[in-house]
Amino acid sequence: MKEKLFHIIHSAFIAPFQCLSLCVLYFGAFISITGITAVQLFMVFDFASLGMWAIIEHFVIRSLFVSMLIMPLWLWLSTALPFKRYAYLVLSVQIVSGTFLFLAGQGASVWVSTLLFSISVSSYWTLFHLMMSFSVSDHNSANEVCMADAGVTAGVLLGSVLGGVALTYGLGVQTFIMGTVMMFIGTLVVSVLIYKKVQKGELALRFLSEGEELSWHNIKGQSRNIYSTAYEGAFQVVADFLAPVWLKFMSVSAMGVGLLSAAKIGLKLLVSPIVGHFANQGSSGDGTKNHDLEIGLGLKCLGWVPWLFMQTPFLYAFSSMFWTAGQHFFSMGLASRWYKQRSVFKLALREFSLGAGRLAATLVAVPLLYWSLNSYIVFSILLSAGMMLTTKSFRGFAKRTFSGVSSAVRSVP
């Protein structure tokens, strides 16, 4: 028992740091995400004051144009261009889009601000996903993904606090400059890391991996991952992206939203060893163990239940514990499954699926949120419960129950 516990803790907190490339990636993620989160929190809170259509416009741009079009394009370009030229393109685009957004100022339209900033953000995430996919190990990928997420979450923590301070004291310009500079530094760090690997021959970027073909059969083989990822994107919208909006409706200050968002990191670190253990089993390749996804869905459902009976800002802190733990189980296991396939095409498919889920949830959830918070909560519960019904464990339970009932009915004289 002691040996197994030591192995789980070692795999979660020590082994992921034994790879220098991954350590650099974790550091780069922390820097970039701090800046990105601070600016995004400021933007969403600002757009919320403009009404429902501004929020819909913001998230439709992020989902449709960025996740479903721009991210796959960035991923394809990473394989079509020599990496040095690609890195220069990414960094140049960040500088140009950041400059235009700064010159446009807060008077810019919602779609212009969102598109310019999202182009920069998507260029960073492209490099992050490429590095993760071609750096994670076959035996401990889930824990390595968890540690990368810890770097991201630490960035979200600091960025949320900084964004809350910026909104409280009207420091929009300063936040934007700080955020874009930090994102540029993090992108530069990851770009140099990938370039060195390419130069040494340790990394060969090809859109289709060896033996892979662009076909419907290949896409169909990812059907489970695709709809699970689309669900993940939808849940991100209702429980994460829109949280600043509905908390604002409850009169929670920007600083309060920032602190509530920041509080999640401790829980993620606490459950990471358990998440990594189950997710490594789930991504083993045989597809028979999906306990990480099922536990995640169950926790998400539990987090929404109290909202049927009361809606208070304090309840968000309670439910966030369930949502955060549930999302950690679900998203880390799912990301590990995608990364271990080491295919740029599969990464593009993942981003498209995320965008599709986010777009669908935006078009339904935002109008519900502005119409009635109760309707929004019911939709969110149904979203998690509906996904829960598709799991193998539930189908097995339903089959056993139905068989038992059928047998009992047949035995009645």
Image: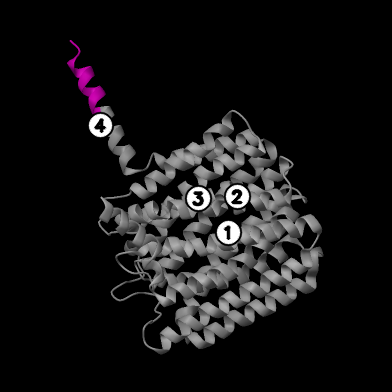
Instruction: Kindly state the secondary structure of the residue where label 1 is placed.
Output: helix
Q: Nearer the viewer, residue 108 or 235?
A: 235
**Where is mark 2, residue-wise?**
362
Q: Which residue shows up at 37% across the image and 51% down it?
A: 274
The amino acid at mark 3 is Leu
Q: CA distance from mark 3 to mark 1?
A: 28 Å
| Magenta stretch: helix, strand or loop mostly | helix
Q: Which residue shows up at 41% across the image and 72% down it?
A: 344
Q: Quadrant of the C terminus?
A: top left
The amino acid at mark 4 is Arg
- Mark 3 vs mark 1, foreground winner is 3
**Where is mark 1, residue-wise?**
63
Position of 184 compared to 134: left or right?
Answer: right
The amino acid at mark 2 is Thr
**Where is mark 3, residue-wise?**
267
Reply above or below: 115 against 92.
Answer: above
**Where is mark 4, residue-wise?**
400
| Magenta extent | 403-413
Quadrant of res 8: bottom left
Magenta stretch: includes residue 405: yes
Picture colour scheme: one colour
Q: CA distance from mark 3 to mark 4?
A: 35 Å
Circle 4 packing at 10 Å, graded few (<14), some (14-19), many (20+), is few
- Mark 4 vs mark 1, foreground winner is 4
Circle 1 packing at 10 Å, graded few (<14), some (14-19), many (20+), is many
